Amino acid sequence: MTTTQASSNTQAPIGIFDSGIGGLSIARCVAQNLPNEQLIYVADSGFAPYGDKSHKDIIARADVVANFLIAQGVKAIVVACNTATVVAIEALRAKYALPIIGVEPAIKPAAKQSTSKSVGILVTQATAKNARFLALIDTYKQAAQVHIQPCPGLVQQIEQGQHHSDTCHQLLDRFIAPLVAKQIDTLVLGCTHYPLIETQIKAHLPEGIALVETAQPVTNELIRRLSQFNLLTARPNASKPYQVYSSALTEIQQQVIRSFWPSQLSFHQL
Ligand code: DGL
């Protein structure tokens, strides 16, 4: 049942959320492409990672966060989380009437551009076993073999700002080496946290393996949906700092977020 109408105020903010800080990889692309828009970012870090939660729990948290954003008057929501998208976006769209844009692993472009026809994909555990995700692979893999690699523990390393640590490098080696052995030439980053550590991921890949992520296509889709409803702002609105809410706000988290987002942000506990 649809319970909420989209805000028709073009000056209203855009809500973006993830289980934690991963959605910043999407938010930074949105901010670059839509500099006049105001953003509210929610890191549901008190409940991260979503990747090892049940589908029921992920749907419940996505609903709490969407409700919060709608109460802040947002005109659209970007579910900047592959896990929450594949698990919960249908439930959110059924309940709320505003534009809700999701993030799905970029299997289609990856399969198309792969010449070895061997594609690797790094995902969370929940995404790896999700029926919608598996169907997406079946639909778009064409002639390619798609090798799914769940990455337990990696999101926590990024959340804690530990992506330079030996533990993180050992995890990356464990997850990436089996894909390299499968002669992949294209690697899909199927969790929004992973583009934040692109440099560390590249260090584990031989030359010539292309990385594919989804920030730009998601931003393009957001622009398309806002234009469709005449919701793009015509006036500069971004003199205020972006608002960041976290369900587990700590000093360390603020430092980690600032390390990925150098411009001014205003932090709040959710
Ligand atoms: N960043 C999220 C994604 O894109 C999820 C990470 C997690 O909480 O497991 O899947």
Image (cartoon, rainbow, N blue to C red):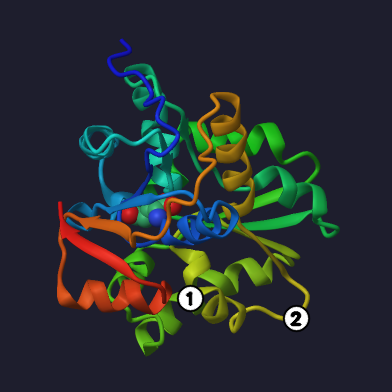
- Residue 26 x %, y %: 49, 55
Q: Amino acid at mark 2?
A: Glu
Q: Quadrant of residue 171?
A: bottom left
42 to the left or right of 215:
left
Question: Which quarter holds ligand 1?
Answer: bottom left
Instruction: Tell me which numbered mark, 1 or 2, is placed earlier along the sequence.
Output: 1
- For the point 59% across and 81% down, the residue is 204
Q: Which residue bears the numbered disc 2?
A: 207
Q: Residues within 10 Å of mark 2 (few under 14, many from 20)?
A: few
Residue in front for this viewpoint, 15 or 194: 15
Q: Which mark is residue 52?
A: none
Placement of the N terminus among the 4 image quadrants = top left
Q: Residue 235, percent across and down? A: 50, 45
Residue 172 - label: 1
110 or 220, which is in the foreground? 220
- Asked if residue 72 shows in the view, the reply is yes
| Local SS, label 1 | helix
